[in-house]
Amino acid sequence: MFLPRPRSLVRDQGELVLDHSTTLGAPPALAGVLAWLQGALRPATGLPFATAEAATIQLSLADELEPEAYQLSVGSHVTICGGSPAGVFYGCQALLQLLPPAIYRRAPVSGQRWSLPAVQVDDAPRFGWRGVMLDVARHFLPKHDVLRFLDLMAAHRLNTLHWHLTDDQGWRCEIRRYPRLTEVGAWRRESQVGAGRDASGDGRPHGGYYTQDDVREIVAYAAERFITIVPEIESPGHVQAALAAYPSLGVTGQALEVWTRWGISRDVLNIEESTVDFFTGVLDEVLELFPSRYIGVGGDECPRDQWRADPRTRERMAELGTDDPQSWFIRRLDDHLTAAGRRSFGWDELLEGSPGPGTAIASWRGSTGTVAAARRGHDVVACPDDLVYLDYRQSELPDEPIPVSIPLAVADVYAFDPVPAELTPDEARHVLGGQANVWTEHADSPRTIDYLVFPRLCAVAEALWSSAERDFPDFDRRLRHHLARLDALGVEYRHADGPRPWQRRPGIPGRPESREERAAHVAGLVANIQVS
């Protein structure tokens, strides 16, 4: 009943029962994984799981395995061998799935027999980027809930959190040289309720941010679970929270409030050298906090109206010899990151211009960006909205809460394959993997995030870990067993028959679309991307 599905599974006769004599062992290089496994096994079982040299459960490394690969063998003893500590960690996650779902509870479970079936598992992931984008700008997610989300990612062998930290509606990361970004930019006076231009506000202030100490803690917590956090600092659009804090960054220079509406603010950054210096200064502090190879710079949905109408911007464009302020601005940030030994990561709108050669792309508007990026030699992460946007409604039922766009059921998400069929093998090597995107305009609590994300994220996890072959009936059978694990973990997922009463939002308008309407809209959005 593994999820994700392993590459090879052989069942043997017999079982191994865990008891007070069960011990754990590992070389020094795996001390962190060993400590994590003890912490995972002890609460529900109440067993000590002491360490020993000739242990019942032995962890080890093998150079011949791929870094994230593992081999798990259960017989009279358990061995978990990985190509790196990450591989061993994934083997430990597989070990937990062999135990009763109650293993995920955080206090002793009485009357439970902790038995492991005899198996041989040989497994490795298909993709190196197995991710989730989590938006904490629209609605702030407190630190302890971010840590919980990382645990849920790790349980599904996801290894990349794309952390959307800034937007029009809030700035969530402390930048010490620019304190007003969080003193002002982290707070808004109210939030829009529902979708649509006529949607009302709730009259309730909202905000929050992560101190640099919080960020370091979250990054370290993620690293212990072999999750890399890729931060995103939006630019040159989606910046009204920054403009509220520092109006001189904007084209108009006018005082603004942190935006209280959803959608796209028309206010954007100016292209003065001082504004570039401001954002490279922001990135310098971000680089100190996040060791990720990739740093998100945004680049999506940037209106050009203010630039076209502003005499100073037109003068500046002439000085710079550019007719594309967005590409120029993002390229300056990319140069700065490249000089620091990092790589910029931006949305597929960057392909409408000329991104730097080392820029990686997040392709969200269908598969066009994935194909274009790969053919132009850019690494790319596939996150097509019509398959893996987990804020989209989950059915045609009238009681789906604040229904957004097209319905994406578990079966739809399970069909996700990051590699478009039209790519050649050489082009496909640029596809790093994929991620689900979780936008939070209409997710104002961790309970709502649970509802939107699970169990659809389980399907994403398998699509990114397992082979390209798809067998939804088999997945659905394993998922039904997996839901008991989510129950034990306290995840308030969406049930197959629809939302529970407390998961509904009666009377709050959404913006549902048909697939035909959405496809036509996206086709218009990507018309300026040259695919070949």
Image: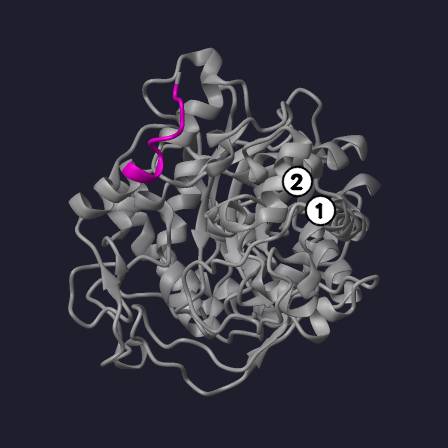
Residue at x 28% of width, y 71% of height = 401
State the image quarter where residue 44 is shown: bottom right
| Residue 123 is at least partly visible in this image | no
Pick out the residue farthest to the bottom. 203
Q: Which residues are magenta?
A: 524-531
Question: Sequence order check: which comes first, mark 1 or mark 2?
Answer: 1
Secondary structure mostly taken by the magenta-highlighted segment of the chain: loop
Residue under the image location 23 percent in, 41 percent down = 519
Q: Rounded to the nearest whole Å, what is the CA distance between mark 1 and mark 2?
A: 8 Å
In the image, residue 42 lies at what x, y percent? 64, 65
Q: Position of residue 225 (x, y in %)?
A: 65, 50
Residue 190 higher or lower than 482, as above or below:
below
Q: Residues within 10 Å of mark 1 (few under 14, many from 20)?
A: some
Q: Which quadrant, please, contains the C terminus? A: top left
Judge from the rendering whether residue 225 lies leftward or rightward of residue 291; answer left or right: left
> Pointer 2: what residue?
316
Residue 476 in percent (x, y) is at 27, 48
| Depth order, front residue of 73/334 | 334
Asked which secondary structure carries label 2, the reply is: helix
Mark 2 packing: few (<14 Cα in 10 Å), some, or many (20+)? some
Q: Is residue 295 left or right of residue 433?
A: right
Q: Amino acid at mark 1?
A: Glu
Q: Are marks 1 and 2 in contact (CB under 8 Å)?
A: yes
Residue under pointer 1: 272
Disc 2 marks a residue whose amino acid type is Arg
